[in-house]
Image (cartoon, helix red, strand yellow):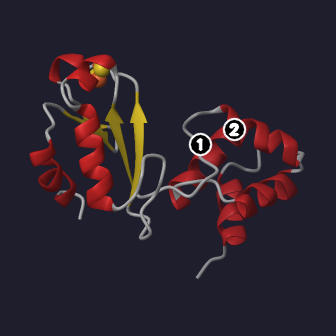
Amino acid sequence: MLTINDKVIAIIKKYNGERGQLVSILQDIQAEYFYLPEEALIQVSKTMGIPESRVYDVATFFKAFSLKPRGRHIIDVCLGTACHVRGGVRVLETIERRLSIKRGETTEDSKFTLETVNCMGCCAVGPAVKIDGEYYGHMSTDKVNDLLAKFE
Ligand code: FES
């Protein structure tokens, strides 16, 4: 099995080690591990000759990157006003209980990361939930089990 360092070196090679490709390289690493492990960032710095501080600057600048372990499926529950008044919090609490995690956390089996957002632009179908970029509207506590089952 390839180590993190082997994987990172292979990804960097794919981009010919070009420094201008740093964001793409970090994207590929995140696609592999669902987050950016510290060991990987150090390896990027060493292999590409970019100061660690610069690699971290880029890794923390983009919201899409995470330095904390994340699950294979990212759940966003909308708590914007329109979704909130239609029961967004109850949907969130039901998912929290179902997965035994709180918002901002990842399940122990690394299957799900649960996050909240403030409006995702589909207020008319609130309460809304997004999983892996796909929107699910008119959510209710009753629908949570069926929805999560699609990913199990
Ligand atoms: S408030 Fe939830 S989508 Fe706008």
Name the residue at 58% across, 46% down: 27
Q: Is residue 34 left or right of residue 73?
A: right
Q: Which mark is residue 65?
A: 1
Q: Please report the residue visible at 15 percent of the width from the left and 36 percent of the height from the top.
A: 139
Query: Toward the viewer: 44 or 97?
Result: 97
- Ligand 1 picture quarter: top left
Q: Is residue 21 visible?
A: no
> Residue 14, labelled with which disc?
none
**Residue at the (41%, 70%) spot, across then down:** 109
Q: Position of residue 1 (x, y in %)?
A: 58, 82
Q: Position of residue 12 (x, y in %)?
A: 71, 55
Q: Residues within 10 Å of mark 2 (few under 14, many from 20)?
A: few
* Residue 67 falls left or right of residue 82: right
**Decide: marks 1, 2 in contact (CB < 8 A)?**
yes
In the rendered view of the protein, which quadrant contains the C terminus?
bottom left
The answer to whether 112 is drawn above or below residue 27 in the figure is: below
Tell me which amino acid carries mark 1.
Phe
- Work out whether residue 119 can be spotted: yes
Q: Residues within 10 Å of mark 1 (few under 14, many from 20)?
A: some
Please provide percent x and percent y for residue 57. Answer: 77, 37
The residue where tag 2 is placed is: 60
The answer to whether the residue bearing label 1 lies less than 8 angstroms from the nearest atom of ligand 1 is no
Q: Quadrant of residue 119?
A: top left
Q: CA distance from mark 1 to mark 2?
A: 7 Å
Image quadrant where residue 8 sits: bottom right
Q: Amino acid at mark 2?
A: Thr
Of 65 and 11, nearer the camera is 65
